[in-house]
Image: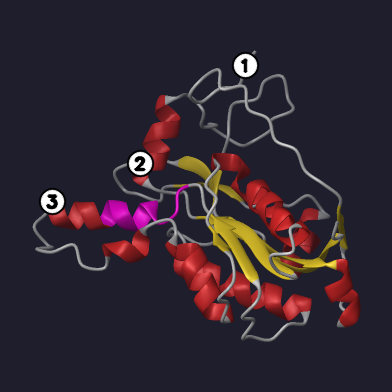
């Protein structure tokens, strides 16, 4: 069995990139602020990059650039696998596309294919010049973990020696806000899940990508190694559409 290691990390969130986010976390800073991303919806606590929702494609490009630089790799990487997913994908763009259609601003829905969830993995493969395995996990809040697990399996099966894995989200959309509020899952002030008076979750923009690599490949090119991935496990109780079994 191939040993799997982490040789590169790319991170973007409300606190910055891999370096600045860590520097901001040490003194306990948070990116959560009360904002009103849409004029027709109330003020809510969110963790955003800026005043308006982040563009998912721009975020994806930045993450790929970051992780390749951190891993010391240069494209093209034709044999590198890609496992990049998203819980909601381009939901915000699809919502705006539908609003424009209903308002009569669009006569044809041209370009809608590039807003489907699989586009993130396809565009990533194109950016790094990959013609290898390409997977697009969608597992709600576990999408990022699931992408690492799938990448781990690709390496252990010998499908490739390197695989770019990750997930990214731009979840601040009208539908997401309305849906979570309807379920009573959105916090009113902040997110403190381990407090007995916890309120709920906070929508946050961001993403992370990791370069997983076989130990032999990493050692051959003398790459820095953050750590080793030893295994994974998943479970599902399938008890409720949105809540775990109590």
Query: Residue 134, position in %: x, y?
Result: 55, 64
Work out whether residue 224 can be spotted: no
Indicate the secondary structure of the residue bearing disc 3: helix
> Does the magenta segment cover residue 95?
yes
What residue sits 60% from the left and 60% below the top? 83
Above or below, 75 against 31 in this view is: below
The answer to which of marks 1 and 2 sits earlier in the sequence is 2
- How far is the residue under mark 1 from the one under mark 2? 26 Å
- How far is the residue under mark 2 from the one under mark 3? 16 Å
Query: Residue 160, position in %: x, y?
Result: 70, 69
> Which mark, by number, is residue 245?
1
Q: Number of callouts in the render?
A: 3
Indicate the secondary structure of the residue bearing disc 2: helix
The answer to which of marks 2 and 3 sits earlier in the sequence is 3
Judging depth in this view, the residue of 230 and 195 nearest the camera is: 230
What residue sits 77% from the left and 43% below the top? 232
Q: Tell me if mark 2 has few (under 14), some (14-19) or many (20+) residues whose alpha carbon lies within 10 angstroms of its own.
A: few
What residue sits 13% from the left and 51% below the top? 102
Work out whether residue 130 can be spotted: yes
In the displayed structure, does residue 69 sit left or right of residue 109? right
What residue sits 26% from the left and 68% below the top? 111
Residue at mark 3: 102
Magenta stretch in the rendered image: 88-96
In the displayed structure, does residue 15 sit left or right of residue 226? left
Residue at mark 2: 175
Considering the image in quadrants, where does the C terminus appear? top right
Task: For the residues labelled 3 and 1, say whether their Cβ atoms are less than 8 Å apart.
Answer: no
Query: Residue 234, position in %: x, y?
Result: 70, 35
Above or below, 113 against 176 in this view is: below
Q: Nearer the viewer, mark 1 or mark 2?
A: 1
């Amino acid at each position: 069995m191939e040993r799997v290691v982490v040789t590169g990390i790319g991170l973007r969130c409300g606190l910055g990139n891999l370096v600045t986010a860590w520097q901001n976390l040490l003194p306990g800073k948070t990116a959560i602020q009360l904002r009103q991303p849409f004029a027709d919806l109330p003020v809510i606590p969110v963790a955003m990059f800026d005043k308006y929702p982040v563009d998912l494609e721009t975020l994806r490009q930045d993450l790929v650039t970051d992780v390749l630089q951190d891993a010391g790799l240069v494209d093209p990487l034709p044999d590198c696998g890609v496992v990049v997913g998203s819980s909601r994908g381009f939901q915000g763009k699809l919502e705006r596309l539908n609003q424009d259609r209903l308002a009569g601003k669009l006569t044809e829905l041209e370009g809608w294919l590039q807003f489907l969830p699989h586009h993130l993995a396809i565009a990533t493969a194109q950016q790094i010049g990959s013609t290898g395995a390409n997977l697009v996990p969608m597992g709600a809040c576990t999408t990022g973990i699931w992408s690492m697990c799938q990448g781990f399996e690709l390496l252990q099966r010998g499908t490739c020696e390197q695989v770019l894995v990750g997930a990214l989200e731009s979840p601040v959309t009208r539908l997401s806000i309305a849906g979570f509020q309807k379920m009573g899952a959105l916090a009113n002030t902040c997110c403190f899940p381990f407090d007995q008076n916890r309120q709920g979750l906070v929508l946050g923009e961001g993403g992370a990508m990791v370069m997983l690599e076989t130990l032999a490949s990493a050692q051959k090119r003398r790459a820095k190694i953050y750590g080793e991935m030893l295994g994974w496990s998943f479970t599902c109780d399938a008890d409720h559409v949105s809540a775990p079994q109590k």
